[in-house]
Amino acid sequence: MGLRTVFTDHSLFGFSDAASIIANKLLKFSLSDVDHVICVSHTCKENTTLRASLNPLSVSVIPNAVVASNFRPLQPQEAKFLTLQGDRGALLPSPPDPTHHIGPGDPITIVVISRLFYNKGTDLLISALPLLLRRHENLRFIIAGSGPKAIDLEQTLDSLPQGLVYMPNGQSRVVQIGSIRHEEVRDVMVRGHMLLSTSLTEAFGTVLVEAASCGLMVVATRVGGVPEVLPGNMTVFVLPEVQDVVRGVTEAVGLLTTKAVRRDRFHDQVKMMYSWADIARRTERVYDLITGSPSAPDNSEYYNSEWENYGQPITTQSFALIDRLKRYYGCGIWAGKLFVLVVVVDYLIYCVLEVLYPREGIDLCKPWPKVQKPAHHGREGSKELERDGTVRQRGGGRRDARRQSVESSTEPRLDS
């Protein structure tokens, strides 16, 4: 159809097993006619570039982000209002007071939020759990997530001595709450002091950013793009080995009890590092480059003459059918011929659809309205014209921009 295309990759794959070889070949086929690729980490970029035989200059790294306001540390006045769906909240430890210093004998709660699958390192967690319970009597665990490995985890806990799993008051030191909704993640995280991630493969790890934003110390396996996510003062990295996981948790416990880390500063630091506004601006920059469009006025201030041509592709891919078939033919001796056949059939179907449903009959998306700054700024009741066609009043609420333009001709207006 002649549309510029960008592919976003969030995954990591190997190169040795049959499933990975087939997946990589299909990826190379899919990306042969794509203008640009976005990866969430530099490790993911390297992996995708090798798997699909891409030009590294046509691959950009734009990480994920979080809404920091949705993952803020626990405030003292809101501790009694934390609720979870059902009766699970009653089984969990009480939220710690963020202003209270953790002493050497104080309880420390470790939060695990993960799908209980092999690639998420659940076997590693199951093996390390008994060792951690024996070494640190003050540790508590909250495990949120579901998957086929949940049964193995339950069987392991049942096989341990009762005195190791339960406290003298009968409360379990390891609480499994199953799968939780995304809006409940923060309410679970703020009940802990530390997040433990034992994943065996991870392209980015958004849960690590969410945990740090909530003020949790992070212990994570050094795999994939995890080392790129957070700075060293927030994270203890471990090898994907049982003994090293125990070593990393022990180190993190020592940091928490000796005031070596300032968890109260994590939220502000994460808010400065990750922002969806920044991610959107960088993604828009990619589309501007492949389409040859100038940067939007609200983005131009971020890209001066030094960055004007940064990331610009060396050559623009031709949309001519013969050139596109050549790119598919280069995917392999046998696979290339098969891919060319698939593309030819797909192109013929496209031609038939073009006759039956011509593109002239398809409604085009209207251009996104540009941001306009109001002519006057007042301290009380000043207004800001937003992209969604409404006017936000600092003094109180929103109202429709068109209705307001009738009331006052001096205020900004959105064209239909």
Image (tube, rainbow, N blue to C red):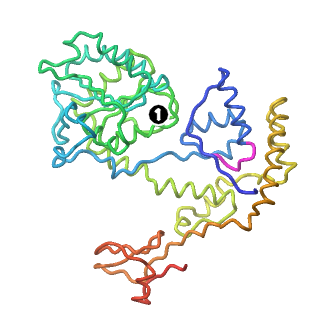
Give the vertical position of 225 relative to 282 (above or below).
above
Q: Quadrant of residue 165?
A: top left
- Give me the residue at 40% from left, 83% from top: 404
Q: Position of residue 82 (x, y in %)?
A: 22, 43
Q: Is residue 298 above or below residue 67?
A: below
Q: How many marks?
A: 1
In the image: residue 202, left or right of residue 288: left
Q: From the image, which quarter does the C terminus lie in?
A: bottom right
Classify mark 1: residues with Cα within 10 Å, few (<14), some (14-19) or many (20+).
some
| Residue 40 quadrant | top right
What residue range appears in magenta? 32-37
Q: Amino acid at mark 1?
A: Pro
Residue 90 position in % (x across, y down): 19, 34
Residue 329 falls left or right of residue 382: right
Give the main secondary structure of the magenta stretch: loop
Up-down relation of residue 345 to residue 109 (above or below): below
Residue at x 75% of width, y 56% of height: 1
Q: Is residue 333 left or right of residue 123?
A: right
Q: At 62% across and 33% down in the image, what residue appears?
A: 47
For residue 36: magenta?
Answer: yes
Q: Is residue 325 magenta?
A: no
- Of the pair 393 and 250, the residue shown nearer to us: 393
The residue tagged 1 is 227
Of 111 and 277, which appears nearest the observer?
A: 111
> Going by the picture, which residue comes out furthest to the front?
356
